[in-house]
Amino acid sequence: DAGVIQSPRHEVTEMGQEVTLRCKPISGHNSLFWYRQTMMRGLELLIYFNNNVPIDDSGMPEDRFSAKMPNASFSTLKIQPSEPRDSAVYFCASSRQTPGLTPETQYFGPGTRLLVL
Amino acid sequence: GDSVTQMEGPVTLSEEAFLTINCTYTATGYPSLFWYVQYPGEGLQLLLKATKADDKGSNKGFEATYRKETTSFHLEKGSVQVSDSAVYFCALGYGGATNKLIFGTGTLLAVQP
């Protein structure tokens, strides 16, 4: 299996520009998570989807951030307009949700390093 | 609400030293507990897990025991290697409809030769 695929791996943009991050989860996984990691705030869960439906977006910092999952094999995280404080590493992770009491392992992608100038 | 507290890093050790990274949790239910590891420039990956009280998770020489009485899940390794240098995250989670994990802040481990 190829694992979780994220693109681009690195993104440098200027303040005010739109940024789109992409994620392809592991085939057969039905849960998808977007995280942001910074030195100051550590690892933050932004939003997660089950079966392509957003379940919890309470971690999305503000209206400039939006996420979509149009099908089981693709998700995007968009920032419009971007600001320097959005500079971070953005991770996508996927897992297989089961009705049982034990959460399944989350598999992380390699991350997208975003720098907003 | 639920939360995870880890010891502050960095933890700096010499090769072959004994490692302990403390993790305590607060939970409203009966979660599963996890340790994830992040090597430089990579995403997190599962190191070990335990799903109920008194369970011991182990992998690659690391182990941690789910202690309900002390609400702890400390990570230990008897003899660390330079290749163990990474950031270690403790996490808790529930299955079913609420599928997300709650992560601690991470502890940086630096092993010197």
Image (spheres, rainbow, N blue to C red):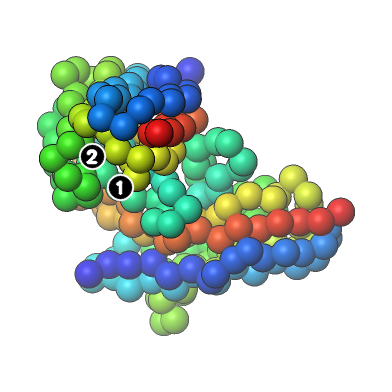
> Could you say which is closer to the camera, residue A37 or residue A18?
A18
| Quadrant (top left/top right/bottom left/bottom right) for the N terminus of chain B | bottom left
Q: Residue at horizontal 66%, vertical 58%?
A: B109
The picture places residue B39, in percent across and down from the top left corner, at 61, 42
Mark 2 and mark 1 in contact? Answer it, CB < 8 Å: yes
Q: Residue at x 28, y 55 (%)?
A: B94
Q: Is residue A85 left or right of residue B65?
A: left
Residue A19 point in image, percent of width and height: 29, 25
Front residue (pair B76, A108)? A108
Disc sitting over residue A48 in the figure: 2
Q: Is residue B84 in view from this perspective?
A: yes
Residue A72 at x, y = what percent?
23, 20
Give the residue type at disc 2: Tyr
Q: Nearer the viewer, residue B63 or B84?
A: B84
Single out the residue that lies furthest toward the right: B113
**Crowd tier of the residue under label 1, counting other residues whose Cα lies within 10 Å: few below 14, some 14–19, many 20 or above:** many
